[in-house]
Image (cartoon, helix red, strand yellow):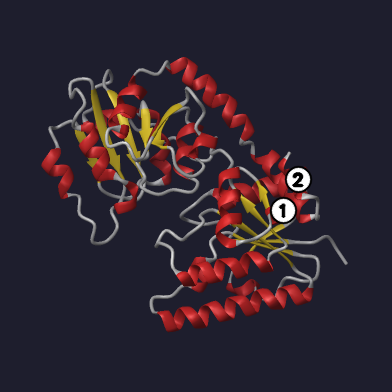
Amino acid sequence: MGEPTVYMWPKKSPHNKYSELLSDSIERQGQHVEHYGPRSVLKPRKGDVVHFHWPSYTYQASVFPLTIAKSSLFLLLLLLYKGMGVRLYWTVHNIWPHTGKSRWDAFMRRRILNLCDSAFALSESVRQEAVSVFGVPEEKLVVTPHGHYLGAYPESGADIRARFGIPKDRFLFLFVGRINPYKGVEQLVAAYRSLPSEACSLLIAGQADAGYGLDFIDAANDGTIKVHPSFVDDGELADYLRAADAVVLPYRQITTSGSAILALSYKKPVVAPNLGSLGEYVPEGGGVLYDPEDPEGLRKALLASMKLNKKAAEERISDKLKELDWDRIAGRMLRAYAGAVPQEVNA
């Protein structure tokens, strides 16, 4: 029997570079990785690895009877793999799907975890939450941090400040990403409007979910709030980040934020609520985390971010990025694939 193959589900995604960067780093370690898709169902053999990331897309449907059917097929597939000696792994990016939790999600995710040889949590807080919520042993989950995005997005050289008429001497807050209720953009606009308008600007860049209007921005805009109400292309994402002084992520709920790690990858301080694993990623002095229960928390955090020492913040962020090296993370996963003791992998 030849070397085992890792079937990454997915190896690449148009919506998230995480699995691509992870797959590349695993391949640099000498392990063969293939994309897992509909045509891959019959490919895994004994000893191979099937590593999936967002299972809710596989078992959820628009109507509940179809969800039951899809869920049953998914569980049967995992049981088939187990019977064949295929090893199963799940990276728990979120405790619950972005669509919200339900009793069916709890049922499915508990069973998925039980069928997996091991699962990966992107932080210790996520690991502890998964253990508590789904009732699995601690040793079932291995902490493997979310890697950085250094060099992942090319720069086009676009002058984003000039495009939106933002003076170079203005402190620029940036929100970038999909816009929906749980992202907290309405709260960001309200908090921003309480700041001295002559000292700062706010750029909101991203596509709003269907049915979610942005009229609240127009009503509050004094001319210093700039809006790019559509998807930011990968070719310009780095340019937006380079233009900012701080990236604001006023989420109402969060497990692990790739957006926070993206901001840190460009040495930008992060302003965000102290939720989920953000406290494990945003270093002290490299951003401002606020109490989400404090009505003044976001406003005070915005003001505090304007007073951060830029050089010191960049040094703190650089130290954190060393911990988020992809090859280091891939090494941990490969040891887990090989059946290493999880405690050794966490070290």
- Residue 157's spot in the image, x, y percent? 39, 31
Q: Is residue 328 visible?
A: yes
User: In percent of the image, x 53 and y 61: which residue is there?
Assistant: 54
- Residue 344's spot in the image, x, y percent? 78, 43
Residue 343 circle label: 2
| Category of crowding for the residue at label 1, using alpha-carbon neighbours closer than 10 angstroms: few (below 14), some (14–19), many (at least 20) | few
- Residue that label 1 marks: 139
User: In percent of the image, x 80 and y 70: which residue is there?
Assistant: 46
Q: Is residue 305 left or right of residue 39?
A: left
Q: Is residue 36 visible?
A: no
User: In percent of the image, x 40 and y 29: which residue is there?
Assistant: 242
Query: Is 309 situated above or below 189?
Result: above
Evaluate if marks 1 and 2 touch, with contact meaning CB atoms under 8 Å apart: yes
Q: Is residue 195 left or right of residue 326?
A: left
Nearer to the camera, 292 or 323 = 292
* Amino acid marked by disc 1: Glu
- Residue 323's spot in the image, x, y percent? 63, 33
- Residue 169's spot in the image, x, y percent? 27, 18
Quadrant containing the C terminus is top right
* Amino acid marked by disc 2: Gln
Nearer to the camera, 138 or 281 = 138
Q: Residue 324: which quarter of the image?
A: top right
| Category of crowding for the residue at label 2, using alpha-carbon neighbours closer than 10 angstroms: few (below 14), some (14–19), many (at least 20) | few
Name which of mark 1 and mark 2 comes first in the sequence: 1
What secondary structure is found at the residue carrying circle 1?
A: helix
User: In percent of the image, x 57 and y 81: which residue is there?
Assistant: 72
Give the distance between the C-alpha atoms of the residues marked 1 and 2, in whole angstroms: 7 Å
What secondary structure is found at the residue carrying circle 2?
A: helix
Quadrant containing the N terminus is bottom right
